[in-house]
Amino acid sequence: MSKLLLTFWLAVSAALTTAAPPLHVTPAPQRAASPVVWVQTYDREGRPAAAASGFFVQPDVVLTRLNLIASADTARAFAPGDRRGFKVLGVVGVDRELGLVLLKLEGARGVPPTLDDGEWLKKGGDVEALGSNANLQETRSPARVSSVNLPRYEITGAIPAASYGGPVLTRDGKAVGVVLGNTATRGTLLAASVERVPSLVARMTPLKTLSELRERADSASAPRDTSADDPPIIIQSDPPADTTPGRAPASSSQQQQQPPPVVVRQSQPAPPLEARRAPPRTASTRFPGEPETPVQSAPPPPLAGATPDIRDKTVGKATGAETKPEPYTIVPIFYGTDRARTGATEPRDFYGAGRGKLELGMCEVSIPSEHVPGQLESPSIWRLEFKEDPKLHVVLLSVKPLDAGEFHSQFQTRLGAAASRDVFVFVHGYNVKFVDAARRTAQLAYDLNFPGVPVLYSWPSQGSLSGYTTDENEVVWTEPHLKQFLTDLAAQGASGARIHLVAHSMGNRALTNVLRSLAAERATPLFSEVILTAPDVDAEVFGRDLAPAIQKIARRVTLYASSSDTALLASKKIHGYPRAGDSLPEIIVVPGMDSIDASGIDTDMLGHSYFAQMKVVMDDMKLLLIASKLPGERSLLEQIRGASRYWRLPGVIVTRNGGTLTPGARLLSVRNGLLLAVLLVACAVAVWLILRARRRVAN
C-alpha cells in the first residue's frame, strides 16, 4: 500500500512540475498594449507639475507636446491601466515649429501606430482623437476635420483637454496628427500633422535629461554672453487663445512673477509656443482638474472617486528619496461677497451675516486625503472630534481680501495656468454661512475635477433656520452687487473664458433676476452654462418670465428639480405656490431649457443638496460643464417623451399611477413622516423645558 501511495505521489509531482512554469524568469521590459500614454511631469521638489497624453513612435520613444516639459525636472509615462509606468529618461528630439517633443522611456516596449502624412485629409473627413487621462483610462473622441492647412489642420468634436498630445487617428487606426489644443472657436481644436515625425525620429539628438533642461532654464535669467551659443527654443510663459493646460502658482507673491522659460538648444530660433508651466509651489495648491498635488513636497494617497495618485513614488526631493504622502490637498477659491467683516481673524469667522460693501478676495480650503465625494467632512462628537483638522475635515484655512486690480490680475494668472479657460461661479442658497459656502465651493470643484478656476459669490445669508424671511430680503438686496461682480469678472479677470454659473436654492432668485436684467441690456450671450439647482423660486414666475429671458444671456440653461425635496415642500407651504425646483405635480418644461428630474435620489433628510452630494448628479454635471455634452449625449440620462419633453436620472419615477404612490412619491411620504415626527418631538421637548423653567421660577 505504501509503495502504491509513493508511486501516486511521484506521478502527481511529475505532472505538476511539467505543467508549472519556471520559478525564475528573466524579467522582460514592460509592453504597452495601447499606443497612447499619460505623461506626468514633476518639478524639482517632486511635486506634480503638468500632464498630458502622448503616444509611442518607437517602442521606447513617446511623442507629445513640447510645452509639457516647461517646468519638468522628472517625468513618468503611464500606459492605460498600468500604475507602474515608465521613467522618462529625457528629450531626444524637438520640433519647435509644431510644438512637439520626443521623450525617451526606460524599459518600455510600446506599440507605435502606423503613421500617415495625412495629405489626403479634406474638410468633413471623420477622425478620432485617442488619449488618456489621470485615471489611466484610454479615451476615444470622434471628431471631424473642419479645415486643412498642412502641416496643421483643425478638427471639431467634444475632445477632453486630457487628450491633448494624443494622436489623431483615421478610421483604420492610422495616426495622421497630434492634438495640440483649443482654438478661439468653441469645440474646434488645432492638430499638427505627423508628416515630419519620421524624419524627427530618424535624426534623434543625444539624450538631454529634464533636470538638465531645468537647470538651463534656471540660469537663463542670469546675464551672460550667449553669442557663441546656438539660438535657443524658448517656451513662452503666456499661452495664446488655445486653452491648453497650464501652471498653478502657489502664493500671491509667486503669482505676480513669471517663471524663467525652458530653454532647449537648437540651431535656429523658435517662434513663441503655447505653455504649460508650474513654478515650484510652497503648499499643495491644486486646481481641480489637475493631477493630485500634495502638501509640501509629498504625493497624496489615492482618493475615492477622485483623480488617483500616479506620481513617481521614487521621486522625492532633489535627492530622489521616497517621500510620504501628505494628508490633504489645498483648493484655492476666488470669491466676491457683500457680507460685512466681523473683525475676527479666524478664517471661519472673518465674514458675518451683516450687510457690507462688495469685497473681492481669495481663500484656501483643505480637502482631506480620505475625502468621500459629496461630503463636507466636519468634526463629529460621535468620533470624539472637537476641533477642525485639515487631515480629516474640509476646512477653510485662509481668507485674503484683495483690491479689484490685484484680484483680476491674480485671476488672469490663475486662469492662464489652468487646464482649460473655464470658470464656474457658485451662488449659495438660504441658511449658509460664508465658511460653509467656501467649503461647498471647494468640495464641488474638487469632486467635479473641474479643470478651470472655481469662484464663490456669497451674499449675507443669516446662516440659521430661523432666518428664512431675513434671507429673502437679503437675496433681493444683493442683486446689484452680484450683477456688478459678474459683469466685472467677465470683462476683466475672466475675459475670453467660458463662464459657467451654478446656483442653489434661494440663490437662484438673485441669479435669475440678475440674468434677466443683463439679457435686457445685451444682444449676445455672456455666459456659457447656467445650472439652476433646486431653485426656491415661484414656479409660474420662473416658467413665464425668468427662464425665457435668461436663455438670451446664456448659451444653455439647465434646471435640476426633485419631488423628494422636503425643503422646497416647506417653502411651498409658506408661499402657497409650487417652487421651480419641485417636480410635483410636474417638472417645469420651457422650450430651449434642459429640465432634469432628480427625484428619488436620497441624500440627507431634507433632500435639498443632492446637486453636490450624490455622485450620479455630479457625474451628470461634470459631463455638462467639462465635456459640454447635450442631455441626449450623457449616458446617465434617459429621455421621456409625451406631452412634454424632459430628462430624468436613471431609476427616477415621480408621477402618481392610479392613486398608488410611486417609489419617488413614497420616499417623499416616508421622509416627510420622519421629519414631522422629529419636529413634533423637538417641539414637545421645548414646551416641557419652558414649563419646567416657569414652575421653578414660580416656586
Image (cartoon, helix red, strand yellow):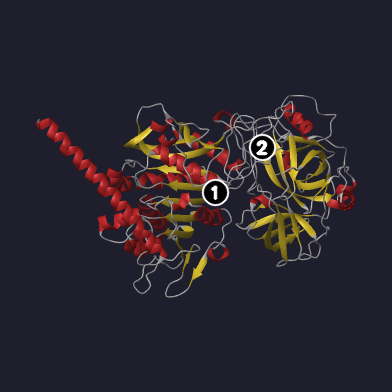
Q: Which amino acid type is shown beneath numbered disc 1?
A: Leu
Label located before the other in sequence (2 or 1): 2
| Residue 484 badge | none
Residue 485's x, y, as percent? Answer: 43, 44
- Classify 10 Å Cα crowding around label 2: few (below 14), some (14-19), many (20 and above): many
Residue under label 2, please give it: 48
Picture residue at 61% right of the left edge, 37% below the top: 248
Picture residue at 20% right of the left edge, 38% below the top: 689
Q: In this view, does 46 lie above or below 581?
A: above
Picture residue at 12% right of the left edge, 31% below the top: 697
Please give left or right for residue 465 compared with residue 389 in the image.
left
Of the pair 596 and 673, the residue shown nearer to us = 673
Please give left or right for residue 157 compared with residue 215 in the image.
left
- Classify 10 Å Cα crowding around label 1: few (below 14), some (14-19), many (20 and above): many
Residue 542's x, y, as percent? Answer: 35, 61
Residue 485 in view here: yes
Of the pair 218 and 682, the residue shown nearer to us = 682
Please give left or right for residue 398 compared with residue 198 in the image.
left
Residue 523 in view here: no
Circle 1: element type: helix
Q: Is residue 342 above or below residue 442?
A: above
Q: Is residue 154 above or below residue 604?
A: below
Distance from Cα at disc 2 to Cα at disc 1: 19 Å
Picture residue at 61% right of the left edge, 56% below the top: 185
The C terminus lies in quadrant: top left
Q: Which amino acid type is shown beneath numbered disc 2?
A: Pro
